[in-house]
Image: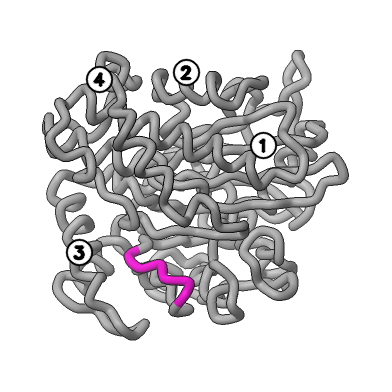
Amino acid sequence: MMRAIGLMSGTSLDGVDVALIDTDGTALKVARTENGFIEPLGPTGYRAYSDEERALLRQALVDAEKIEARDERPGCLAEAEELVTRSHAEAVEAFLAENGLDPGQIGVIGFHGQTVVHRPDQRMTIQIGDGQRLAARLGIPVVYELRRADIEAGGQGAPLVPVFHRALAEASGFAGPLGILNLGGVANVTLITERGDLLAFDTGPGNALIDDWMRERTGRPLDDGGRTAARGRPDGALLAWLLTHPFFARKPPKSLDRNWFSHKLAGQLSTEDGAATLTAFTAQAVARALDHAPEPPLRWIVAGGGARNGELMRLLNYHLRTEITTADAVGWSSAYLEAQAFAYLAVLSLLGLPITFPSTTGVREPLTGGVKALP
């Protein structure tokens, strides 16, 4: 077994997630609770971005729209890349100290970086953050650029987590058909058939539109518990129009950029009605995923920040009409699942094992990925 740390800074721009797992690249090292669920895979940590840091990262997303080549860093992107590298290093240093761990005990770090560009049709995906500098500062090998090889081979470069979802399901003893839904800034789903085959793709917006709406209208970073949306009424005409976007009819695998949809589409609606409309949009986009399911899931497990949004979960229960539970309720981690996944992917990368597949990203054949940086 190898001990690995995974790092994730997602499209919600809230901070850096840190998670530790033990794996041999196939199985996860787990212990079980009395009710048969798995114990937490390992300790976790978090380093929040300050308001000023979030503002810099949001501006970086705007400036990144001008990028035409991978090595370009227009506007504030160079400054943002330095921030991403430094904040991830600080997150790991604090995590090691809090858990009494020495860098020599860690075999590898999986470093996702911060996505600022994702254009699969142009074979371009950019996650800012300097993996080599991170390895040098921490004294631990780092695997980064985990999406790049897949994109360059013609895949979507996303989602990357499905192979970890399957390992988690196997460790938990869950058989398919199973749906695992991650509600981050963008929502993505992994569908596992009864035989264990994978189909994965982005379903549409996750928390990003709701968060952006709440920030603009109230100054708050999110709709806490979905309470604002619960007080509003969705705009049926706008919702129906949003769901005509060709992305939803496209056959998977498929992925989208955070900025494909805008919270500004809710326009002149009240704060409550706009939140209700965008929340309903997220839920119904997930339901549209069933149009592509080879076997409709008998159980759904929901992870990511959206699992804490009560109104979104209520709508998912209504539209999916089958057993839905949160990742935390079955011994998984809603908040840190993606960080755990990047630890797992880093180990797969070191072993030269596939991390993407034709049925998850559309790449022609199973493919490993990642760039290794040594201290």
Q: Disc 3 or 2, which lies upstream in sequence?
A: 3
Residue 266's quadrant in the figure? top left
- Name the residue: 27% across, 37% down: 211
Residues at discs 1 and 4 in contact (Cβ within 8 Å): no
Q: Which residue is mark 4?
A: 228
Residues at discs 2 and 1 in contact (Cβ within 8 Å): no
- Name the residue: 39% across, 71% down: 126
Real-space CA distance between mark 4 and mark 2, rounded to the nearest whole angstrom = 14 Å
Circle 1 residues within 10 Å: few <14, some 14–19, many ≥20: many
Residue 86's x, y, as percent? Answer: 29, 61
Real-space CA distance between mark 3 and mark 4, rounded to the nearest whole angstrom = 27 Å
Q: Is residue 75 above or below residue 1?
A: below
Residue 39's quadrant in the figure? top right
- Report if residue 241 lies within the magenta region: no
Q: Amino acid at mark 3?
A: Val
Nearer to the camera, 309 or 327? 309
Residue 32's x, y, as percent? Answer: 75, 25
Q: Amino acid at mark 4?
A: Thr
Circle 4 residues within 10 Å: few <14, some 14–19, many ≥20: some
Q: Secondary structure at mark 2?
A: helix
Q: Amino acid at mark 1?
A: Gly
> Secondary structure of the magenta portion, mostly?
strand
Q: Which residue is mark 2?
A: 314
Res. 182 in view: yes
Real-space CA distance between mark 1 and mark 4, rounded to the nearest whole angstrom = 28 Å
Q: Which residue is mark 1?
A: 179
- Name the residue: 54% across, 75% down: 151
> Which contiguous range is marked in magenta?
116-121
Q: Which residue is mark 3?
A: 62
